[in-house]
Image (cartoon, coloured by chain):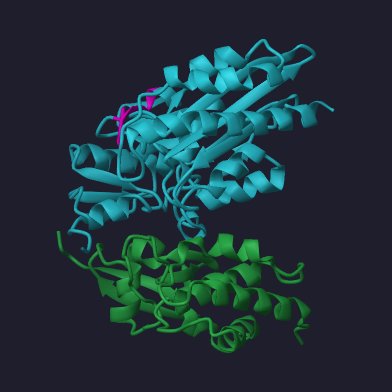
Chain colours: A green, B cyan
């Protein structure tokens, strides 16, 4: 019953194979088997959003997924978005707006906002309301959200004006 | 806590899946998106011997429309996939309801049919399925059967499926052109479980509301239709009957209290969600008639 299974995942563009019990959660496999530490476990029941990753490009709560469920699919964490121009805009805006304090929720916020901006490339800038709707599943206990929302709106504005080479 | 140990299977056919379910004699659970199942495993509310994952069965991810108003939703279709289909095809009721389901990151994996099978009394899609004549295709080791959605729910978090059965797809009858439909709910915060919600579908003719269907969530042990509301609004010019119709909901509910809202609060909020859903459905029907 506790026998392990081999699971292959495309993590940040690289195929990885892990030998795990089927009950292992994606968030734990990313952190403990693959050393990906931007994936944070907060509530562990899909409420706080700190473990948000992209599954085939769409945001998902990795504490509510078994790793076996996403076998052969593409998983992107914050580490995998390093150097991406849209992520860079977000990071600059978070810095300028003091949009983080302890930083625990920040990777989940950034990954979720990245997918929002990435889906909208070329469209009009985001409204504050759209950002608030998108972040309804990401809790921050430090900032009170104003600075995070401001940063996201600013990054979206910068992103919509950017022309990729 | 972490989920307890279980055997995991990802069969590639429906008959393989139902055989595995039968062999487990009620000690197995079907895994679709897992967005309700995994929290239950983590809390050790359930400790199944086996999980049967449907992800590899062909056709389970398909949404198909027969061009005649019947929309078929496979067992692995996610909330977000149906939300996107609805927004591409302009189906306001489905768009309204999807926006209330969990958070965006939960809608990526959570499934429509999984939510129905989970039989949460406050699940948004149940109200939608109840007013759109939803039927579930059910597969078991003895073959297939089809039941109306009202016959699926037997109580909070319990359904009428036998141990060897699973739902393979949901079929909805999409509203026709002279109708309007809407969904409204009250929850502590966006994405939280609904305290109470209502879905409404109305048809208008020259005399007013020719027919109405209303369904409620969070207001009884199961999602259910609201026959008193439907009777109060049908056959009248809408503006005259809104108040009466919304108040009639008290005959259609039997609210239970929980951490999200007491039975008394739900009783207060029921006419509010009914009125919101009806007003919005009527406005859409009026727009669609012109």
Which one is in front, A124 or B280? B280
Indicate whether residue B157 is drawn in magenta: yes
Q: How many marks?
A: 0
Q: Quadrant of residue B220?
A: top left
Which residue is outermost to the left?
A: A1
User: Residue B88 appears at what percent x and percent y?
Assistant: 70, 48
Residue B171 is left or right of residue B121, and the answer is right
* Residues shaded magenta: B151-161
Indicate whether residue B43 is drawn in magenta: no
User: Residue B163 appears at what percent x and percent y?
Assistant: 24, 34
- Compared with B10, B209 (above or below) is above
Which one is in front, B100 or A12? B100
Where does the N terminus of chain A fall, quadrant-wise?
bottom left
Question: Is there any visible trace of residue A11 in the rendered image?
Answer: no
Which one is in front, B134 or B55? B134
Question: Is there any visible trace of residue B41 in the rendered image?
Answer: yes
At 31% across and 50% down in the image, what residue appears? B37
At 15% across and 63% down in the image, what residue appears? A2
At 46% across and 73% down in the image, what residue appears? A108
Residue B25 is left or right of residue A74, and the answer is left
User: Residue B105 appears at what percent x and percent y?
Assistant: 48, 61
User: Residue A102 appears at what percent x and percent y?
Assistant: 40, 84
Residue B122 is left or right of residue B50, and the answer is right
- Compared with B65, B3 (above or below) is below
Which residue is outermost to the right?
A: B290
At 50% across and 27% down in the image, what residue appears? B215
Where does the C terminus of chain A fall, quadrant-wise?
bottom right
């Amino acid at each position: 019953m506790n026998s392990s299974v081999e699971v292959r995942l495309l993590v940040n563009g690289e195929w990885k194979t892990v030998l795990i019990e089927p009950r292992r959660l994606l968030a734990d496999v990313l952190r403990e088997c693959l050393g990906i530490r931007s994936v944070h476990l907060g509530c562990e029941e899909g409420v706080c959003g700190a473990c948000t990753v992209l599954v085939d490009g769409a945001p998902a709560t990795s504490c509510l997924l078994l790793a076996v469920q996403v076998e052969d699919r593409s998983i992107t964490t914050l580490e995998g978005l390093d150097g991406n121009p849209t992520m860079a805009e977000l990071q600059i805006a978070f810095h300028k707006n003091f949009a983080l304090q302890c930083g625990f929720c920040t990777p989940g916020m950034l990954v979720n906002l990245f997918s929002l901006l990435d889906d909208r490339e070329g469209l009009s800038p985001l409204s504050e309301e759209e950002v608030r709707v998108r972040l309804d599943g990401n809790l921050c206990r430090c900032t009170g959200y104003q600075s995070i929302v401001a940063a996201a709106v600013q990054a979206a504005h910068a992103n919509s004006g950017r022309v990729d080479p | 806590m972490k989920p307890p140990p279980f055997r995991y299977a990802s069969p590639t056919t429906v008959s393989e899946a139902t055989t595995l379910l039968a062999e487990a004699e009620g000690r197995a659970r079907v895994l679709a998106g897992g967005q309700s199942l995994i929290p239950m495993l983590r809390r050790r509310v359930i400790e199944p011997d086996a999980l049967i994952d449907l992800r590899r069965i062909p056709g389970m991810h398909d949404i198909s429309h027969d061009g005649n108003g019947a929309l078929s939703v496979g067992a692995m279709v996610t909330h977000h996939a149906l939300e996107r289909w609805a927004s591409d095809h302009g189906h306001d009721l489905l768009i309204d309801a999807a926006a209330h389901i969990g958070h965006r990151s939960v809608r990526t994996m959570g499934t429509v049919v999984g939510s129905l099978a989970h039989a949460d009394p406050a699940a948004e899609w149940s109200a939608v399925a109840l007013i759109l004549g939803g039927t579930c295709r059910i597969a078991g080791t003895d073959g297939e059967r089809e039941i109306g959605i009202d016959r699926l729910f037997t109580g909070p978090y319990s359904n009428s499926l036998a141990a060897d059965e699973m739902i393979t797809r949901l079929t909805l009858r999409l509203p026709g052109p002279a109708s309007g439909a809407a969904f409204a709910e009250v929850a502590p915060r966006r994405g939280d479980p609904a305290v109470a919600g209502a879905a409404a579908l109305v048809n208008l003719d020259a005399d007013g509301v020719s027919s109405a269907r209303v369904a409620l969530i969070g207001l009884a042990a199961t999602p259910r239709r609201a026959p008193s509301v439907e009777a109060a609004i049908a056959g009248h010019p809408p503006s005259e009957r809104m108040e009466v119709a919304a108040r009639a909901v008290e005959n259609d509910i039997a609210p239970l209290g929980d951490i999200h809202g007491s039975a008394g609060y739900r009783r207060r909020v029921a006419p509010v969600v009914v009125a919101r859903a009806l007003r919005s459905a009527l406005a859409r029907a009026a727009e669609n008639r012109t």
